[in-house]
Structure formats: structure tokens, C-alpha cells
Image (cartoon, rainbow, N blue to C red):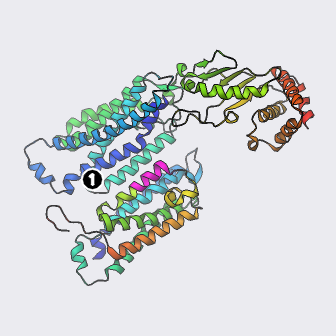
Amino acid sequence: LHLRGRRIATLVAGLAVLGLLTWLVADWLMNRPWSAGSSDRALLTRWAPAVAAALGSIGLAGEDEDMERSTAAPWRLVRAVHMAALAVLLAGALALTALSEPETFGAHVLVRNTEGYVGIVAAMATIFGARLSWAPLFALLAIVEVAGRGAGPASAWWTWPAQPSDVDAASWMAAALFIGGLGVYALFGARIERHPDTGSA
Amino acid sequence: MSFAAAVRMSLFVLAPAAVLFGAWQGGRERRRRVDDQLAAVAKPSWRPLVVTWAALTLGFWVGLLVVVAAGIAFVAPIATYWPPGWWAVVAVAFVGLAAMAAVGVALGRMVPSRLVGPTAAVVFYAAMIYAIDDAGQLRGVEWLAPVLSTYDAPGHVISGSMSLRQTLWFVGLVSAALTVVGARKKWPAVVPAAAAAGAAWALVAVPYDIWQPDPAAAEMVCTDDTPTVCLIRQDAFLMDEVVVQVQEAIGKFEGVRHAPDRAVQAAWFADERPAPGDLVVELDGGPTFTGGLAHADWSQLLHWNIGNDCVQPATDFVGLAEIVDLWLNDSTMDWHSPEAVTMVESLRAMPEADQRDWIGRYLEAATTCDPALVELLDELA
């Protein structure tokens, strides 16, 4: 019932399409005559996880959060397990698309960025609600894209999505964001959104 | 054409943003649950759609105008050349943004998901990036994107007919997208769709050399004084700063026979190249944000173009040119081979007068590719 309420079927279908597209694009990038190897996938490793995290955001709140929370279920634990399982599912699916030459900008970065993004989206869901939780992530990525592409490891604290796999600081940053997001989301859950006309959630 | 191309390149951010916000606005009625009410109103269904698109487009045009105005404010006071048709290339940016907004609105109206905006934005962003990075290798498909790569822009222009084809493509796209999702009868969309398809075919069928060389931009502009400094017309706004650095470099040759008295810019698209014996001006670093010279000092800006054209034995002659280049440019030791660095240190260890004598003999021999050049190497061994 929980899975159905969180529209997991939609998520899985969307993830399958995303995974297939990511694999096709990654394959095309790696096999172009002028391909420079896995670094050609850098753009893909920044944005495919962002779409995946946005896709995951649809299940961060139920259809009627007020009613759900009134039930005697250990919601903090449920939310923590939901988010952890979501991160594993998204990261695992995307990692499968870049297993050839997984270093530099491959499976490793896809997993790292997916974990970090899921953490951000989950944390933002507690502030903006699940519907708009992807927006701050996209704003951050837009800034990284314009100002942080090609930045060195010294700026990894904010350009971590654009760093290659061997930059430890980027991995630590993503891990911290994931753990932080997990904690905040498990504690508070998504902000309850009310319809402007009816006042219902 | 660099300025106009830079404006178009800014669309790699603005175009996906237009798609994102267009999709968000396009799905607004459905999210607010007023789409059924609006459908019941006895007014044409395209009106609210066109108003949404027009408001969004206007907002993005204001954003782009800020980009253009800021660029012109920096460029206009110092520019020494405006290529023909630059304004048409900039104008296409506005039409392209309108098309991206229309595509976004149509997607938002057609796809009932709040994720259509971010997903479409990512797809369009990736398309823009590859249209820039892989320009020339995409069989002309890159010309369908509103962005333009700046890499090929220096010294080149885009014809007015090309800008016209892009305008037709984007206008057709706007009309077709809005008609398909806004009008009750869909068939009129065939007309703009056919126009867009025709323009798209005309764009894709064009070979990549659509970038036409602009001889006026690459024409050399020279000073009348000695030493003579020649820069291409489009970079001539840097002349005063380059002259100062050339004079400083030429000062190193004081008392040397056959010393260079001319510095000429080497631009990849210019027909006129530096002649043997000229100091070569490299402006690869480009100007700074405010239009100053990017290179901090002449050792990064200038190198010596003598001896490199000698045929036999080529490697030794090139080695010689490298040594003299190093002697001229004190601060570039890191780039060179250890042998060359050792030899230039031997040269610098000589008394000042001997250094000038050695350089003078080198210049004399290099002018005629005299094999005696090789013997000069032995003196430094």
C-alpha cells in the first residue's frame, strides 16, 4: 500500500526509460570517432542523476500526508528506509549504464552524484514540499554548470557534481549531503502541501 | 563575429531555462485544476496559451536584452571592427528563445507531469552543449539549435541567408507548437510545420563552411612608427598595449645586427602571416573582460619567427630558434627541452657584447638558412 501510495510503478517505469536513454547516450559518446574516453560522459554524470532524483521526488510524499501521519506507523523509520531504498535503486540503475571505463566520469560519479542529489532533494522536500523539491537542486546545478565546470578539487565543496571520481572531497561532500538529507527527511518528512482552493493536502 | 556568437552562446543557459519555465507555465492550468473551467469558457482556447507564451517570451527577451546591452556597453567603446550582419545573428537569438519557450509551453500542456519541465530542460541543455562542442561533426544538425559556437567566429561571418533560414525554422516551430496544443482544429499546424521542416532541411543541407572568411576582419592594420606593429583589424583595439610591449622586447636587441624591427600578429584565419625575422604577436589569450591585453608581459605575447623555415637540418635550426626565443623571453624556461635550457644558459653566461654578437651572427645566417647555423650551436655546447 505504501509503495502504491508513493507511485513506485511510475518511478520504476520512468527510471527504466531514463536508464535506457542514459545508456544509449553514454554509448554514443564513448564510441564517437573523436571520443576522448570517459571524460566525454561528464555532462551525463551531472544531469542524468538530477533527472533521476527529480523522478524520485514524486514518492517523497503520499497523496494525503495528513491522513498517513495520523496512522500509528513508525513514520520516521519508514521514511528513512524509503529514502535509502530509493537512493540504492536510482544509483544502481544509473551505474549500470556506465560500467565500461567506470573511472573518471563513469559509474562511480553517477553513484556519487545520485546519492548527493537524493540527499538534497529529500532535504528540500521538507522545506518546499515534494512537488518542488527538485527546483533547488536544478538551481545549484545551473550555477555549477555556468561557473564550476572544469574547476579544480579545491572548490569541490560546491563543484562536487562536476568533479571526477578520484576527488575524495567530492565523494565526502555527496556522502554528507546524503546523510544530512536522510536525517532531515526522516525526522520531518515532506512539507505538507495544501491545495489553494480546497485547503486539502 | 565573436560578440554576436557570444550572445548566441549565452543561449546554452537561457534556452533550456525557457523550455523549463515554458513547460511549468504550460501545465499551470492543469496543476491549478482550472483547465476544465477554461475549456468551458466561450472564447478561443488559444488565447490563454498565446498570452502565457508571449509573457514568458517577453521575460526572456528582457533577460537577453540585458546580456546584449551589457556586451555592447563593454565592446562598443573599444571595438575596431563590426562584421557585416552581426545584428542578424543576434536577432536570431531572440527568435530562438521564443521558439524554445513555445516548445516548453507545448510540452507542459501535452505531458501531464510536473517533471516534464526539468526533464525537458536537461535534454535541451545537453543538446545545446553538444551543438556547441561537436559543431561541424553533427552533419549540420547543430544549426537547428539556437546556440552558436564561438570557436569558429573570429575572422568569420555568417551570411544573411543563413540567419533567415534559422529565423524561418524557429518561427515555424513557434507557430506549429502553439497551433498543435492551442487551437481546436489541429490541421492548420501543417502549414507552419511544413515551413519549419523546409527551413530545417535548408539548414541541415548546408555544409559546415557556412562560416565564411571575413577578409576585412583579418586585414592587417599597421603602425607607421618603428618598430612597426601589425595586428588584424578585429584585434586592433589592443594596438596601444601591444606597441608598448613590442618596444620593450625590441629593446633587448639594442646593438644587435639584423635586429627585428617589425612585429606581426599570427591569426589562424589571416592570409598575411609573420615573415621570417618578424617578432610574432600571439593573442591566443585574447583580451580581458574589460578589453585589455590578457598577457601580463611581452614574454607571453611575443616570440621569434626566424630560422624555422630553414629546411636542412631542420631539427638543428628549430633548436636554434628555440634558444634565441628563450634568450628573448626570460620567463618561459619551463616549456623547453633541458638541452635548449642548458644552451641558453651558456649564452646568457657570455659577456653582454658576446651575446649580442652571437645573436647577430645567428640572425644573419638564419635569414639565408646558412648551414653555419649548426656551427653556432657548437659554440654553446
SS for tag 1? Answer: loop
* Segment colored magenta: A139-149
Which one is in front, B18 or B41? B18
Residue ranking furthest to the top: B224
Residue B287: give x, y in percent of width and height.
56, 34
> Does residue A147 show up magenta in the picture?
yes
> Is B136 rendered above or below residue A87?
above
Residue located 29% across and 49% down the image: B23
Residue located 41% across and 45% down the image: B13
B307 displayed left or right of B123: right
> Is B178 rendered above or below residue B111?
above
Which one is in front, B61 or B295? B295
Residue A119: give x, y in percent of width and height.
42, 67
- Assign the magenta stretch its main secondary structure: helix
> Is B240 rendered above or below residue A1?
above
**Other residues around mark 1 within 10 Å, as few (<14) / some (14–19) / many (≥20):** some
Q: Quadrant of residue A106?
A: bottom right
Residue B179: give x, y in percent of width and height.
22, 39
Chain containing mark 1: B
Residue A52: give x, y in percent of width and height.
40, 61
Q: Residue at label 1?
A: B111
Q: How many marks?
A: 1
B306 displayed left or right of B179: right
Inspect this view and state whether residue B269 appears. Answer: no
Three-letter code, disc 1: Val
Residue located 42% across and 30% down the image: B72
